[in-house]
Image (spheres, grey):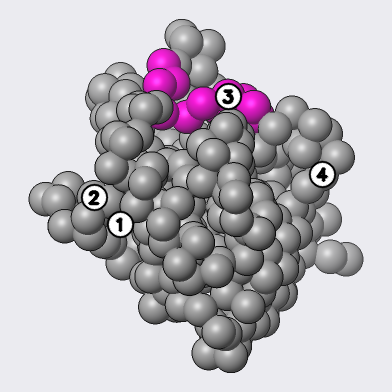
Amino acid sequence: MSAVTVLCSCAENSQKDSRKLSIVTTIYPYYEFAREIAGDNAHVSQLIPPGSEIHDFEPTPKDILRINDADIFIYNGGESDEWVEDVLKSINSDVKVMRMFDYADLLYEEDIEHNKGDEYDEHIWTSLENDKKFVKAISEEIIKLDTPNKDKYKTNSNAYISKLNKLDSSFRATVENSAHNTIVVADRFPILYFVNEYGIKFESAFPGCTSETQPSIKTVTKLIDYVRKNELPVVFHIDNSSESLARIICEDSSAEIKTFYSMHNITREQFESNTSFISLLELNLKSLKEALG
Ligand SMILES: [Zn+2]
């Protein structure tokens, strides 16, 4: 008789134990991690729908109920998730709340002149080192709520961490063996954690995820000159944003436009075709190899 059968044969626990764990996350990366760890043993859902902008999200009463009914609620922390703090005041105290900022190594925001700000940059999931910590922490909380299946969760989280380790080594090797060490991102810049981890330098049109859409002439000129002078092969734009500025920066140079996936969210099409966090990291690796030469 398996451990699950033993548990379910105990009448007073049967209802609770036969019910799947419910895990609700605000954004895509944590949805993916929880799903990879829990597999079919949990119902994992992403509160901010695929294809939506996470920075101006406001929860509906139905969203608040979903958080209230969850066994585990995972959110990022930081500026875009300020709405969460209010919601948490009104929900059930038996929801296990995980704020990923509490598990991350944090970096201060940086402007396009590379001056540090006094607030933390919120895009913590773009660091693979942080991601490994998140996977471990989420796995530990799932195990606390469903201990009989702990071996499965450990196997799944270790397998996922191995994939992240493999990619981490590949990113490191790419940077070590490259001709250039600077990337140009003709867009917002939500990948500070990523570049910091590998010592990649950057020039960008905007800092972080500012709502600004018009860079100054000075910035545009600086980026164009940088790409031409250094004969950079690639100019990046960020996923779910327009390529228009990248096109201007590439004009009259031999640079190609590539997408860098920051993975705040994925599109509805990516969601329906089961696009994975790992597969998007692999695309980033391929583009980075071309960008650094
Ligand atoms: Zn952002």
In x, y percent, where is residue 77?
32, 43
Q: Earlier in the sequence, mark 4 or mark 1?
A: 1
Give the residue number, with chain letter if any, for mark 1: 102
Residue kind at label 1, given as amino acid type: Asp
Foreground disc of the pair 4, 1: 4
Quarter of the image that includes the N terminus: bottom right
Foreground disc of the pair 3, 1: 3
Figure quadrant of residue 225: bottom left
Give the CA distance from mark 3 to mark 1. Answer: 25 Å
Give the residue number, with chain letter if any, for mark 4: 274
Q: Which mark is residue 52?
A: 3
Foreground disc of the pair 1, 2: 2
Foreground disc of the pair 3, 2: 2
Residue kind at label 4, given as amino acid type: Asn
Q: Dots 1 and 2: beta carbons under 8 Å?
A: no
Q: Earlier in the sequence, mark 3 or mark 4?
A: 3
Packing grade of label 1 (10 A; few <14, some 14-19, many >=20) is few
Residue 152 falls left or right of residue 140:
right
Give the total of numbered labels.
Answer: 4
What element does badge 3 sit on?
Answer: loop
Q: Earlier in the sequence, mark 1 or mark 2?
A: 1
Residue kind at label 3, given as amino acid type: Ser
Q: Which mark is residue 111?
A: 2
Give the CA distance from mark 1 to mark 2. Answer: 24 Å
- Considering the whole magenta stretch, tell me its main secondary structure: loop
Residue at left offset 37%, top offset 46%:
221
Figure quadrant of residue 64: top left
